[in-house]
Amino acid sequence: MNKLVNKNIVITGASSGIGENVAMKVAELGARPILLARSSDRLHKICETINKKTAVNSIYFQLDVSDFEQVKKVFQQIYEEVGYVDILLNNAGFGVFDAFSEASFEEIAKMFDVNVLGLMACTKEVLPSMLERNAGHIINIASQAGKLATPKSSGYSATKHAVLGFTNSLRMELAKTNIFVTAVNPGPIETNFFTIADKSGNYIKNVKRFMLKSDEVANKITQLMIHPKRELNLPRWMDIGSTLYNVFPHLAEKVAGKMFDKK
């Protein structure tokens, strides 16, 4: 039995990359993707494609998740349109790689607004209904950077540490309910994320052979919606590295310090 048929799935950051790919995959399985992003033009095109290729009625709303009043208004519209949300995929986010001494504090603040507070704001809007129905699934896209910080990613890593902390705490708060809470921790993925994050292009050159395919990550996330679990780590070898770092941090920094500095 297909567990996603007729499910309402809200996806933030749905105008490209993982969000766009997940939207198409869940639609093919009979779910209705509700797309949120800043670019209404992109969302319109994606919705048109989904609705032509599948039997579902995908809808979209323009949203900047860092505008918290707009978040409230958009989710009110969603509830008026579809009634309830079964799954929330908090995918919106961006990063900027810079040495902290040279980083723009405005960019760091914006990363927190989008990656952390925007994610929390969207979660805040779906929780009351999920609690009332005692059902739902919240999936937060964190990062391996939230487990293993590296040079020139202090601001971005800090936001993903915060996402993991929030996700783990929320999961425990909801442990006695039927609401699942999942963290997804991918390594670098081939998306337009690096257009902003890696202006020099050095990071992509250094890690290109290790980069995940967006379509593969979307497949894993879609399966996660069907078979929920507490955490998804991609790729597995990178998660092993972050685990070893947490157990032997001093040794890891001493022995593998140069490996961490790829930006």
Image: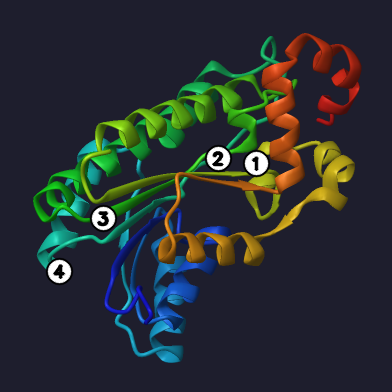
Q: What amino acid does circle 2 point to?
A: Phe
Q: Which residue is drawn at 26% across and 37% down?
A: 68
Q: Please determine whether, in this image, residue 129 is positioned above or below residue 259.
A: below
Q: What amino acid does circle 1 point to?
A: Ile
Q: Which residue is drawn at 13% across and 45% down?
A: 128
Which mark lies nearer to you, 1 or 3? 3
Instruction: Write down the residue under mark 3.
Output: 136
- Marked residue nearer the N-terminal end (2 or 4): 4
Instruction: Write down the residue under mark 1.
Output: 196
Instruction: Write down the residue under mark 4.
Output: 81
Image x and y of residue 61, in percent: 29, 61
Q: What element carries label 3?
A: strand
Q: How far apart are marks 4 and 3 (CA)?
A: 18 Å
Q: What element carries label 4?
A: helix
- Indicate the quadrant where residue 135 lies: bottom left
Q: What amino acid does circle 3 point to?
A: Gly
Q: Which residue is drawn at 88% across and 44% down?
A: 205
Kindly indicate whether the residue at mark 2 contacts the one at mark 1 (C-beta within 8 angstroms).
yes
